[in-house]
Amino acid sequence: MSISSSLNASVAGLSANASKLAAISDNIANSATFGYKRVVTDFHSMVVGSGSGAYAAGGVRTTNMRLIDQGASLVTSENATDLAVRGSGLLPVTTEAAVTLGNGDFPLLMTMTGSFRPDEQGYLRSESGLVLMGWPAAADGTIPTFSRDTPDGLEPIRLNANQFVGEPTTAVEIAANLPATSTVAGAAGTTEELSVEYFDNLGKSESLAISFTPTVPATGASNSWTMTIRDSASGGALIGEYQLQFDDTRGLGGTLASVSTISGGTYDPVSGALSVSVAGGPVEISIGALGAAEGMTQLSDSFAPVSITKNGTSVGNMTSVDVDANGLVRASFDVGVSRVIYQIPLVNVSNINGLESLDYQSYRASSESGSFFLWDAGDGPTGDIVNFARQESATDVAGELTDLIQTQRAYSSNAKVIQTVDEMLQETTNIKR
């Protein structure tokens, strides 16, 4: 019985070391594979019996585990959408087949790194067919609230190189000097004109025609002007009229003393802004706070527009895409606009080493990994996302070669035991002769 158990144990030893050799071979073969996580083989003894009689060898069996939580170095690249996770968490991806099918069902897979580039349809896809997923942003660039324990809100990230964008103007700042001599008795009362371009909701260029008409008194100086605002998009209709009174005291001379609303939105003396309604909606025009040196002034004898600034842009083409550390995908346009179009969350599970391993360094949740949760990158237990980078293989070739030598010796030793058992059985057979 003991001799037979020795034979069985050695056969099990051969099988166990062959399994470890397969793991070592896989690790060495993928030593240059980006994002590869090495496999380790553990040996476990089997006990058949431990009574007072003859001892019977139980043998050995093995279990294999992929160390997904094992870190690896990051290497830089030249592609803005080469992504790697620095720390805990995995990138959400799906299969190219699911995207091509187009039924809206995208199975959630995960990966630690990937080189994602737009395919012919604009989807960010790796060469292995993994498509990056994220939460789509609203039209204003904000990310809506999505459920964190389900992938239902995630969708394949799609970039349209022919995408256009235009931002409407909602705020204008005007700094100009009005001639103080125009409000003195006997002045010609010349109206000063100012045209301010703005962009409507469709990215078209429109203009605000702003005129300043001085109040010429019979004697002395009025220091008063009537400002009117007309909108080209509304057919030149009057959308605001205001009475501007300037201070003539020492220290505050030339600054706004008061603004009276004749028509249009009211003036806020603290912020120095007034609101008018153009054809596409409200626009806030800042002319300066009361007593402030910025904005509208009345000094000297010349009309001088100092500066006119505004937000909004005309229609522009998308030129590049960038991913920041928090997973926000920003598209840049040739008119100087940058807009958030997606957010890439990081997937976290209770037991990362319990994930089911698939091809191309991708993983899938399993009963052993536990439930998953979608975190903002850099929040909670997750790390951040690094672009222009990829994660190297976690294989240590020197360590694997050392294990290879030990495995070879162990395999040879088990084979030697089998040879010895065979010789002992032969001796037992020879007793009958």
Image (cartoon, helix red, strand yellow):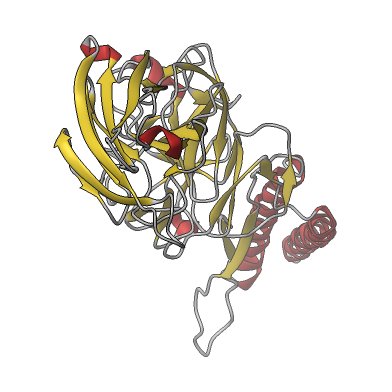
Residue placed most toward the observer, 171 or 396: 171
Q: How many marks?
A: 0
Q: Residue 77's image quarter?
A: top right
Q: Is residue 93 visible?
A: no
Residue at (49% x, 17% y) in the render: 316
In the figure, 402 relative to 298: above or below? below
Q: Residue 261's image quarter?
A: top left
In the figure, 333 relative to 56: above or below? above
Residue placed furthest toward the left: 263
- Give the position of the N terminus as an image quadrant: bottom right
In the figure, 375 relative to 216: above or below? below
Residue at (77% x, 58% y) in the render: 407
- Give the position of the C terminus as an image quadrant: bottom right
> Residue 405 appears at what percent x and percent y?
85, 58
Residue placed most toward the observer, 174 or 212: 212
**In the visual, does 15 lie left or right of 308?**
right
**In the visual, does 170 lie left or right of 28?**
left
Residue placed most toward the observer, 137 or 244: 244
Residue placed furthest toward the bottom: 52
> Residue 174 appears at what percent x and percent y?
42, 36
Residue placed most toward the observer, 189 or 411: 189
Residue at (50% x, 58% y) in the render: 353
> Residue 159 appears at what percent x and percent y?
47, 22
> Residue 113 appears at what percent x and percent y?
59, 42
Q: Is residue 228 visible?
A: yes
